[in-house]
Amino acid sequence: MRNERKEEILNIAIKIIDDAGFSALSMKRVGKIAGISEPAVYRYFKSKEILINEIFNKIISIHKQIADKYNDNLNELDKIENILLEQLKYYEKNREITALIFSSDAFSYSKKIKDKISPILKERENLMISLIKEAQKKGIIKKMDPDHLTKMIAGSIMLLIVNWRMENFSFSLVEKGKILIDTIKTIIISKDDNL
């Protein structure tokens, strides 16, 4: 029961941030929505910063699971596609999370959060770069700067998610993501390869 209530409080906090931003999050507001007193919220989370920290722990855990989910039997291009699609599937099911991940407030709110998120983002970026480099060695992807290519792919996905949020989630993120990924593939696939 305690873990369920703690998860409920986390989800309420995420929803508040999604609806109104970090500045709207307060322990009092969380308690009101959860139907418990403010002191009761503090029994689960000793401070607002700890609550926010736990939210980001949850996000980090999910991102690690997504990165680990790709199939080792696939070629590098398909691994990249799998990781991106898994990420989009998760966001489509948990759209409130995107308010946290794509918010500049998240990084300016706390140095601890920035220090926690930055290595995860760097790890994901390095994974993408290594997959691109390996695909380039095999002649699957054109010879382009892997760092710039990673930024192009990540930026395209980020823009798609931002547009999805701005259009009030009115289209399927996964379906538009598949189209975007196919477009990116036509740009980056080596002409010698028939994937």
Image (spheres, rainbow, N blue to C red):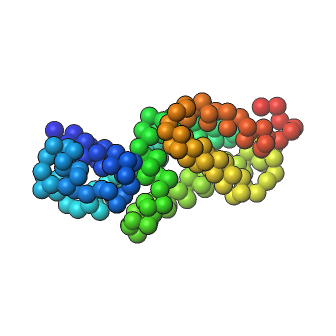
Q: Residue at x 50, y 36 (%)?
A: 169
The quadrant the N terminus occupies is: top left
Instruction: Looking at the picture, tell me which residue is in the foreground, 6 or 169.
Output: 169
Instruction: Looking at the picture, tell me which residue is in the foreground, 178 or 144.
Output: 178
Image side of residue 172 versus residue 64, left or right: right
The quadrant the C terminus occupies is: top right
Q: Residue at x 22, y 44 (%)?
A: 33
Q: Residue furthest bottom?
A: 111
Q: Residue at x 44, y 49 (%)?
A: 99
| Residue 179, x across and y down, in percent | 67, 33
* Residue 194 visible in the snapshot: yes
Q: Quadrant of residue 135?
A: top right
| Residue 137, x across and y down, in percent | 78, 48
| Residue 30, x across and y down, in percent | 23, 50
Q: Quadrant of residue 172?
A: top right
Image side of residue 178 versus residue 161, left or right: right
Image side of residue 75 versus residue 110, left or right: right
Q: Quadrant of residue 53?
A: bottom left
| Residue 56, x across and y down, in percent | 38, 54
**Does residue 16 sit above or below 83 in this rendering?**
below
* Residue 44 visible in the snapshot: no
Image side of residue 150 versus residue 98, left or right: right
Q: Residue at x 28, y 45 (%)?
A: 12
**Does residue 115 sit above or below 61 in this rendering?**
below
